[in-house]
């Protein structure tokens, strides 16, 4: 049963995230989070949890697509949280096309911009030990 | 290579999930993975024929290209019927319900088809938030 749940990368909201990802069976897991919406109402619970999980899983990688790219703007209210995640070793990748399309800049230090991050995202999704969530 | 199933629950143009689903599916096909797409709730608008968005990418054309490349695209019959895309009638021998509202290759089946999709897939992602 546990394996079946792991195989199914359910999209789950941040409440109860650790439990739904398998409780304390997190070693070896590469956690992939995809943010597609504006971060200003829903980011904090996730960043708090991602920060805690950063030391328990093999890796945490956050992709920012569409309005999710707003989280990468320097000076935004979520800047400190995003910077803290990168300082804890969380990889934050922003879709550079969407960031530029919104006229945003500069970017929070430590965030990596890619012009076609879907390619890397698909590699991460299909990687055996990855668990993917949409925030 | 593996198989990826993408569940889409939102319609095009009101959110970017349809476009995002097509981007992920296209990239997965480029990398040699198999792709299943299941459309449920407002996701069943995605294969509608004749879409002509003025300012957005045409997701049904993008989906048609994915189907041509081997993606298996299916819609929930109940959600499609609610939205007027299935007029009634019985499914054929393979369980596909008749419709002339959808692009070629998009099949109307039941949501129960999601079960086998999940079982045969290496990864499943659901675009619903």
Image (cartoon, rainbow, N blue to C red):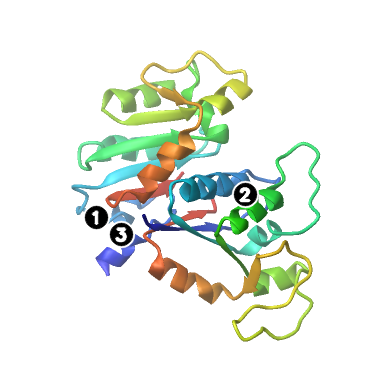
**Disc 3 element:** helix
Disc number at residue A6? Answer: 3
- Residue at 39% in and 70% down: B119
Q: Quadrant of residue A59?
A: top left
Q: Height in image: B40 above or below A105? A: below
Q: Is residue B55 left or right of residue B23?
A: right
The spot of residue A85 in percent (x, y) is 32, 28
Marks 2/3: CA–CA distance: 25 Å
Q: Is residue A73 left or right of residue A44?
A: right
Pointer 2 chain: B
User: Of residues A8 and B31, which is closer to you in this image?
Assistant: B31
The spot of residue A99 in percent (x, y) is 55, 24
Q: Is residue A71 left or right of residue B50?
A: left
Q: Which residue is mark 2?
A: B18
User: Of residues B48 and A22, which is closer to you in this image?
Assistant: B48
The spot of residue A114 in percent (x, y) is 46, 26
- Residue at 42% in and 40% down: A121
Discs 2/1, front: 2
Disc number at residue A23? Answer: 1
Q: Which image quarter is the N terminus of chain B in?
A: bottom left
């Amino acid at each position: 049963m546990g394996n079946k749940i792991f195989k199914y990368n359910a999209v789950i909201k941040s409440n109860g995230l650790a439990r739904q990802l398998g409780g304390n069976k997190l070693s070896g897991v590469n956690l992939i989070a995809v943010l597609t919406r504006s971060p200003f109402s829903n980011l904090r619970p996730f960043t708090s949890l991602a920060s805690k999980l950063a030391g328990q899983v093999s890796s945490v990688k956050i992709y920012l697509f569409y309005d999710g790219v707003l989280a990468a703007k320097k000076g935004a209210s979520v800047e400190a949280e995003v910077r803290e995640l990168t300082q804890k070793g969380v990889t934050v990748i922003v879709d550079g096309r969407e960031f530029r399309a919104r006229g945003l800049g500069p970017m929070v230090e430590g965030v990596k911009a890619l012009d076609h991050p879907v390619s890397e995202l698909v590699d991460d999704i299909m990687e055996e030990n990855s668990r993917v969530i949409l925030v | 290579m593996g198989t990826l199933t993408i569940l889409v629950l939102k319609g095009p143009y009101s959110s970017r999930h349809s476009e995002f689903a097509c981007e992920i599916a296209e990239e997965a096909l480029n990398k040699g993975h198999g792709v299943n797409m299941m459309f449920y709730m407002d996701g069943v608008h995605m294969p509608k024929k004749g879409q002509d968005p003025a300012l957005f990418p045409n997701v049904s054309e993008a989906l048609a290209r994915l189907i041509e490349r081997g993606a298996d695209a299916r819609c929930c019959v109940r959600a499609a019927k609610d939205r007027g895309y299935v007029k009634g009638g019985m499914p054929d021998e393979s369980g596909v319900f008749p419709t002339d509202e959808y692009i070629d290759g998009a099949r109307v089946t039941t949501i129960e088809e999601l079960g086998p999709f999940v079982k045969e897939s290496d990864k499943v992602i659901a675009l619903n938030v």
